[in-house]
Amino acid sequence: MPKTITAAMLAIGDELLSGRTRDKNIGNLAAFLTVHGIDLKEVRIVADEKAAIVEALNAIRTKYDLVFTSGGIGPTHDDITADAVAAAFDVTIDHHAQAMSLLEEHYASRDIEFTDARKRMARIPQGAELIANPVSVAPGFKISNVHVMAGVPAVFQAMLDQVSKDLPAGIPIHSKSVICPHGEGTIGGPLAQIQKENQDVSIGSYPKFDGERFSTEIIVRGRNWDRLETVCKQVETMLAGIH
Amino acid sequence: MPKTITAAMLAIGDELLSGRTRDKNIGNLAAFLTVHGIDLKEVRIVADEKAAIVEALNAIRTKYDLVFTSGGIGPTHDDITADAVAAAFDVTIDHHAQAMSLLEEHYASRDIEFTDARKRMARIPQGAELIANPVSVAPGFKISNVHVMAGVPAVFQAMLDQVSKDLPAGIPIHSKSVICPHGEGTIGGPLAQIQKENQDVSIGSYPKFDGERFSTEIIVRGRNWDRLETVCKQVETMLAGIH
C-alpha cells in the first residue's frame, strides 16, 4: 500500500489576524487535497513578519511532504513572503529572468508602466521553479516541497490548478454522511463503540445547532468504499434502535 | 505605555482540515481581539489527534499572553480536547462537580437521559475554571492563560462574550481605510515610502480582483487616531498625484 502523503498550509497576512479579511483559501485547499487523497495535517496563519514566516515555514516544511503558502507575493512593501522563503531555505533571491519577461510583456501590452514595485513580483528565490498565474500573470513559485502562491482567492485557486498535475498521487479519501436527528450526547456511547470496532475508518460527529436544538451529522471517512458502506449501515442500525 | 498583549488561537478538528467545514471562529476571534486591543499573532489548525494538540498548545501557550482554542469538547469519542489540554499541562482530568451538576440539572429539566457520553462534557482538567455556556450549558474552561471553547460558532461566540470581561485591557487598535482605484503595482513604490516615514502605524495594502481588474484597499492601522488621520491624508495626497 503506498504511503500516505501529508501536507500543511501556511497562510500569511496581517489582514487574516485582524479580522479584516476572512480567509477563503484554507477551506479551498483542504477540499482540493481531500479530492487528491493528500492528508492536510496542519494549518498555520502568521502575520507579514519575516521572522514569523521563516519559523513557521521551517517547522512545517521538514515535517510534512508538501507545503502550500498563501499571501504576501504582491508588489507592495508588506509583501515579504518571497524574501522570507529565501531566508528559510538560506538561498539568495533576485529578479528571475523568465518572471521579468512575463511581467514586462504583460504590462507593455496594456500600456502600464513596469514600476519597481511591479518588478518586486519577479523576485524569486534561487533554485525555485515558477508556478504560472493565468489570472494576473505575476507567478508563484515552488522551491523543494514548498508551493508559494497568491492570497487573492481567485489567483490561489488558479495556481492550485496549475500545480495539481505535478502533485504525487495519494489514495483518495472517500466520505459518506449519515444525518442523525439526535444530539451527540444521545449517540456518543454507541458511536464510540462502532469506531472502536472499525479502526480502518474514521468516524466524525458534527453537531449542528439551529438556534433551538442540536442535531448531528455523522461522517465516515476512509480509503475503501466498501468498508465505508458497511460501517454506515452499522451506524444506521444503531440509530434505528434509538427512540 | 502599557505593554502589548499578544494572543494565539488553536482551532481543533478533522473537519476543518478535510474541507467539510469552513471555519468561522478564526475570523470572529480575530475581529473580537482587534476591538479589545489584543494582538492575534498566530493561528494553528490541527486534527483531533492528542499528540498534535499537545504539541501545538505547548508551543503557543508559552509564547503568547493568551490562547483560545475551538472545538473538540463535545460528548463523542472524537472530542479529545480536554484530555489533550490536561496532558499539555501535565495535570489530571476528571468529572468536575459543578459541571456535572449544571449538566445533570439541564438534562433532567428536559427529560433527557444524562448518558456517559454527556458526562464526558463535564471532564475538566484539574485547576481549571469553567467558562459558562449560555447556549447549550456544557461549559468550556480556562486553565492558566488558555481558554478552551466550543467549535460550534454560536457557542464559541457566546463563550467569548463570557470571557471578555476578564481579559486584560489592551490599547485598542484603530484602522482607517482608503479606497484606491489603482492596482498595487502602481502605488507600491510611493506607499512604501509613506510607510518608511511613519513607522508608528502599519500600512496594509489589499488587492481586490473583480474578475477583470485589480483595485486596492489601503488600510492604515495604529493605536493613535490622530496619527492615522495624518497618514491617511498623506496617502490620499499621494493617490491624487497618480494619473
Image (cartoon, coloured by chain):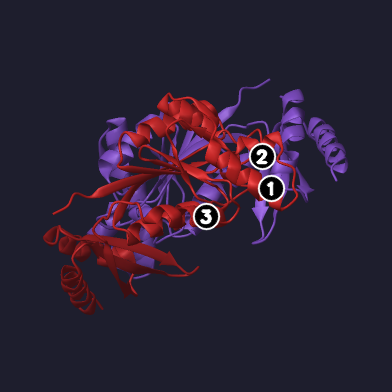
Chain colours: A red, B purple
Residue B232 x, y percent position in the rendering: 81, 37
Closest to the observer: B149 or A223?
Answer: A223
Q: Nearer the viewer, mark 1 or mark 2?
A: 1
Q: Which residue is mark 3?
A: A24
Chain at tag 1: A
Q: Is residue B64 above or below residue B114?
A: above
* Left or right side of B200 for B119: left
Mark 3 to mark 1: distance in Å? 28 Å
Q: Residue at x 47, y 55 (%)?
A: B23
Q: Nearer the viewer, mark 3 or mark 1?
A: 1
Residue B64 appears in the rendering? no
Q: Which residue is mark 2?
A: A118
N-terminal of the pair, mark 1 or mark 2, is: 1
Q: Which mark is residue A107?
A: 1
Q: Which element is circle 2 on?
A: helix
Q: Is residue B147 above or below residue B196?
A: below
N-terminal of the pair, mark 2 or mark 3, is: 3
Q: Residue at x 30, y 57 (%)?
A: B75
Residue A196 appears in the rendering? yes
* Left or right side of A116 for A72: left
Residue type at mark 3 is: Lys
Residue type at mark 1 is: Tyr
Q: Are marks 1 and 2 on the same chain?
A: yes
Quadrant of the image containing the N terminus of chain B: top right
